[in-house]
Image (cartoon, helix red, strand yellow):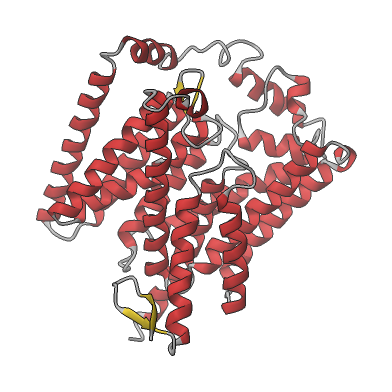
């Protein structure tokens, strides 16, 4: 009697419980990647998938590794600081929800870190393929809405003439699409013709979506992550033929992007928004109380508040929020969170970089994960990434794969 199937399509017998559990776990990882695309409803499908996954993986024997005590301890310290900073504000529902969400982000990060310690390659691939499906859902929905292909879709799927798809904010949609775009680029470079062609179509749809979201930060993160991934793949390529293929296909992808942008700019409505959004001198960026002015004033202000001013309170002192996750850590959780947050990110970046050049079965995919996370970490200096599910997911994936790679390196000489 057959029921489930393995990733290769072979039938899986119910009499094999271990293989059955593994198949369910892979499908859960796929679902986590795909469900992350629908976040304009609360609770989102991702929350349901996350709860089910955590429960199932713990029941099946979710493991912990000593190196993961580092991010675990830092995440706990970070959120303790947030909780202390909000002591006088728990009467406000939004503040309580913010603190609870911060703890939830820590759970997301640690779940992915622990879950990827075992069956690393298969789980990473399942998550990535599901993530690509999620990107397709968000992108296609956004394009349908932006061009009003379905009556009433424009108002639902756009914001201020910017594509937002199944997200609440175009500035979150754009960065969400970065990793699946990078993953598709990698499959184009390494895949056979028809696989490369299929991923090229998906890559094109994602790039168009990111462009129409008109998020300058997302443009920069996508460009930076794809360039960083291409450079690292070139560096680890083992043959001259592989390097030539990388250069050729990346050049072709760049040409496509340029041509696609030129075509889209031929529409007056798109060109006018692009001209406005591409400007480096936005009204909310410049001036004493502009984005960067607030960063300076907030940093000075943080010196006088060792316990912070509490979550969501920055906008009561200034016209807008911090738009800087590092500064927001100081403002929301005081000096404790303000010191721990950069330590958390810097530690992740350094530890994750250690295995970029290590030969592992998941090396190429990990390069894409690390590049995407690294660029989003830089983005945190100019935007609030504190509660982005995909950001903490990539954070956890980075730790899990780095620890798994270190373990593989220790075991290889013995073999």
Tell me the residue at 53%/63% (across/down).
113
**Residue 73, how many percent across, how many down?**
68, 60
Residue at 56%, 47% (x, y): give it.
389
Residue that sits furthest to the left in the current view: 241
Residue 26 placement: quadrant = bottom left
Up-down relation of residue 101 to residue 211 (above or below)? below
41 vs 407, nearest the viewer: 41
- Looking at the rendering, which quadrant does residue 66 occupy? bottom right
Residue 411: quadrant of the picture: bottom left
Q: Position of residue 80 (x, y in %)?
A: 77, 52
Do we see residue 398 in this rendering?
no
Q: Is 130 situated above or below 263?
A: below
Looking at the image, which residue is at 66% across and 21% down? 294
Q: Quadrant of the C terminus?
A: bottom left
Where residue 98 sits in the image (x, y, percent)?
A: 73, 41
Figure quadrant of the N terminus: bottom left
Question: Residue 401 or 62: which is nearer the viewer?
Answer: 62
Say above or below: 385 vs 278: below
Left or right placement of residue 224 versus residue 395 in this view: left
Where is residue 37? Give x, y as percent.
Answer: 48, 45
Residue that lies at the very extreme toward the front in this rendered image: 151
Numbered label tally: 0
Q: Is residue 387 visible?
A: yes
- With 76 as the anchor, is 324 left or right in this view? left
């Amino acid at each position: 009697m057959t029921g489930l199937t393995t990733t290769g399509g072979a039938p899986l017998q119910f009499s094999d419980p271990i293989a059955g559990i593994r198949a369910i776990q892979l499908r859960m990882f796929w679902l986590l990647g795909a469900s992350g695309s629908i976040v304009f409803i609360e609770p989102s499908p991702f929350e349901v998938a996350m709860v089910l996954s955590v429960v199932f993986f713990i029941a099946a024997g979710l493991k912990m590794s000593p190196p993961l005590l580092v991010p675990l301890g830092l995440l706990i310290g970070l959120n303790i600081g947030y909780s202390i900073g909000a002591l006088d504000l728990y009467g406000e529902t939004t503040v309580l929800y913010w603190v609870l969400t911060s703890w939830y982000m820590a759970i997301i990060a640690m779940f992915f870190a622990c879950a990827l310690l075992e069956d690393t390659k298969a789980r990473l691939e399942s998550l990535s393929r599901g993530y690509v499906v999620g990107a397709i859902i968000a992108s296609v929905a956004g394009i349908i809405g932006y061009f009003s292909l379905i009556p009433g879709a424009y108002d639902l799927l756009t914001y201020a003439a910017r594509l937002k798809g199944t997200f609440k904010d175009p500035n979150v949609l754009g960065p969400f699409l970065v990793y699946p775009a990078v993953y598709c680029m990698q499959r184009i470079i390494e895949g056979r013709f028809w696989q490369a062609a299929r991923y090229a179509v998906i890559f094109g749809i994602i790039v168009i979506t990111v462009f129409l979201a008109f998020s300058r930060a997302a443009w920069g993160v996508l460009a930076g992550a794809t360039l960083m991934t291409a450079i690292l793949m070139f560096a680890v390529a083992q043959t001259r033929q592989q390097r030539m293929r990388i250069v050729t296909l990346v050049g072709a992808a760049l040409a496509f992007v340029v041509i696609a942008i030129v075509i889209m700019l031929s529409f007056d409505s798109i060109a006018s928004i692009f001209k406005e959004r591409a400007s480096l001198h936005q009204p909310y960026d410049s001036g004493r109380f502009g984005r960067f002015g607030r960063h300076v004033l907030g940093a000075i202000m943080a010196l006088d508040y060792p316990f912070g001013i509490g979550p969501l309170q920055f906008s009561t002192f200034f016209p807008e929020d911090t738009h800087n996750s590092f500064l927001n850590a100081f403002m929301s959780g005081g000096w404790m969170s303000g010191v721990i947050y950069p330590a958390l990110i810097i530690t992740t970046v350094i530890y994750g970089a250690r295995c970029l050049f290590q030969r592992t079965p998941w090396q190429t995919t990990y390069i894409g994960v690390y590049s995407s996370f690294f660029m989003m970490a830089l983005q945190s200096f100019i935007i609030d990434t504190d509660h982005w599910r995909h950001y903490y997911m990539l954070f956890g994936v980075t730790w899990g794969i780095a620890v798994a790679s270190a373990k593989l390196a220790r075991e290889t000489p013995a073999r």
